Image: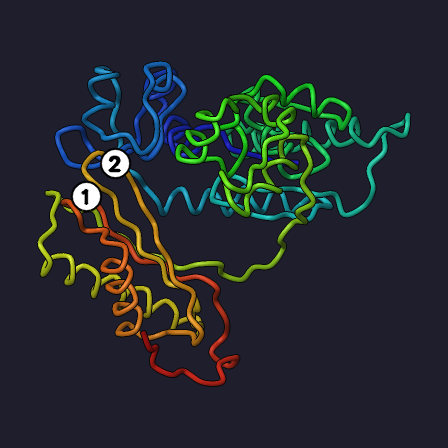
């Protein structure tokens, strides 16, 4: 099962502010300030307002939208309460983000007729009702035999949906959908495939074209997803997967001293978090966003893990220079680290050589 809260941030605002209910609520920066939309209620989405959209654009699309500044502490606290509810059931829970999780029964489910899918759907309906009663929020749940199909199902009947996808329904259900419905197929990959005539998942199911030249190592996974197959297990570890920091500039800039100062500050923040949790990282990533909202990320895998701000900053500068990412003014810049390991696992931390 995959549970996904409906317009989570905006729904919390509508719940906590009764005067907002039934109205287009937009969580994010005010339209007269530089910033983007974090979340939009379904009433606002009718005007094509979406997350990551500039607030000014959202205001033009939805002139009567109610802009609310994000209350991240409130949303995180609500997320913890929701996860507590999920953990009351006999389930393995993989928390994906503040508002979604994969669920898997610890014991086999069967209804009176021995049908596990019907039993799972009854459990999903019980979970939905408990969240609604206790938190006054709605969620959508997809029930399927694997993560890919369950997540797809949770998107089908939003808001407040419950979708069951049986194994024999996977292939015909997927055929008419856009290839963009497959997780991991972003705009660049989609454009490459569409230019070769692969526009729907059905096209992907039918093609005999070699996909490796088009999408590289993602080819085998892409083909598996086209037939609704996914053998990923739930990740039940509580370990951090990554740490990141980013900065959005008030005015787009390619001023090197400004960028370097920002990088140093973010590297220090990331290093502080690493050291707080006694971690080191073997992957460093840089993220940039340009004026037209094009966003690029580049990363480097290191032989020796890093944990201090100087090394993280140095790797970020290296990535910016090697990939010539400051080719135009930047709206946003960010640093991230991943492939984390405990400091006690480090055998040696030698300077990198290029």
| Residue at x 52% of width, y 27% of height | 179
Give the residue at the far right of this rendering.
Answer: 113
SS under mark 1? strand
| Residue at x 55% of width, y 21% of height | 200
- Residue 18 lies, with reference to residue 146, above or below; the image says above
Residue 294 as seen in the image, left or right of residue 12:
left
Q: Mark 2 near mark 1, Cβ–Cβ under 8 Å?
A: yes
Residue 129 appearing in the image: no
Measure how far apart labels 2 and 1 are at the Cα level. Answer: 8 Å
- Residue 147 on image: x %, y %: 64, 39
- Residue 36 on image: x %, y %: 25, 34
Residue 21 as seen in the image, left or right of residue 317:
right
- Residue 11 lies, with reference to residue 233, above or below; the image says above
- Residue 318 on image: x %, y %: 26, 65
Disc number for residue 25:
none
Q: Which residue is mark 2?
A: 293
- Residue 30 on image: x %, y %: 19, 31
| Residue at x 50% of width, y 22% of height | 197
Depth order, front residue of 178/5: 178
SS under mark 2? loop
| Residue at x 51% of width, y 32% of height | 5
The answer to which image quadrant residue 309 occupies is bottom left
- Residue 181 lies, with reference to residue 95, above or below; the image says above
């Amino acid at each position: 099962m995959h549970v996904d809260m409906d317009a989570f941030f905006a729904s919390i605002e509508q719940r906590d502010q009764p005067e907002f209910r039934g109205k287009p609520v937009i969580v994010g920066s005010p339209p007269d300030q530089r910033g983007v939309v974090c979340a939009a209620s379904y009433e606002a989405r009718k005007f094509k307002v979406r997350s990551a959209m500039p607030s000014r654009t959202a205001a033009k699309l939805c002139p009567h939208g109610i802009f609310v500044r994000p209350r991240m502490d409130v949303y995180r606290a609500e997320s913890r309460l929701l996860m507590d509810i999920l953990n009351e059931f006999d389930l393995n829970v993989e928390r994906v983000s503040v508002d979604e999780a994969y669920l898997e029964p610890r014991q086999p489910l069967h209804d009176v007729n021995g049908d596990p899918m019907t039993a799972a759907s009854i459990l999903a309906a019980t979970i939905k009702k408990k969240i609604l009663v206790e938190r006054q929020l709605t969620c959508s749940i997809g029930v399927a035999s694997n993560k890919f199909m369950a997540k797809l199902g949770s998107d089908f009947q939003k808001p407040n949906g419950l979708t069951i996808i049986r194994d024999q329904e996977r292939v015909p259900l997927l055929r008419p959908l856009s290839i963009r419905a497959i997780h991991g197929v972003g705009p660049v990959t989609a454009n490459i495939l569409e230019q070769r005539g692969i526009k729907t998942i059905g096209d992907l199911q039918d093609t005999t074209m070699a996909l490796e030249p088009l999408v590289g190592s993602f080819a085998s996974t892409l083909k598996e997803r086209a037939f609704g197959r996914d053998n990923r297990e739930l990740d039940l570890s509580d370990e951090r997967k990554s740490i990141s920091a980013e900065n959005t500039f008030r005015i787009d800039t390619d001023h090197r001293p400004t960028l370097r100062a920002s990088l140093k500050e973010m590297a220090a923040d990331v290093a502080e978090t690493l050291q707080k949790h006694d971690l080191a990282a073997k992957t460093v990533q840089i993220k940039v966003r340009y004026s037209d909202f094009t966003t690029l990320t580049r990363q480097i895998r290191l032989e020796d893990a890093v944990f201090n701000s100087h090394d993280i900053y140095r790797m970020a500068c290296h990535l910016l220079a090697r990939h010539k990412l400051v080719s135009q003014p930047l709206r946003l810049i960010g640093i991230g680290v991943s492939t984390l390991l405990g400091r006690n696992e480090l055998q040696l931390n030698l300077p990198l050589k290029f």
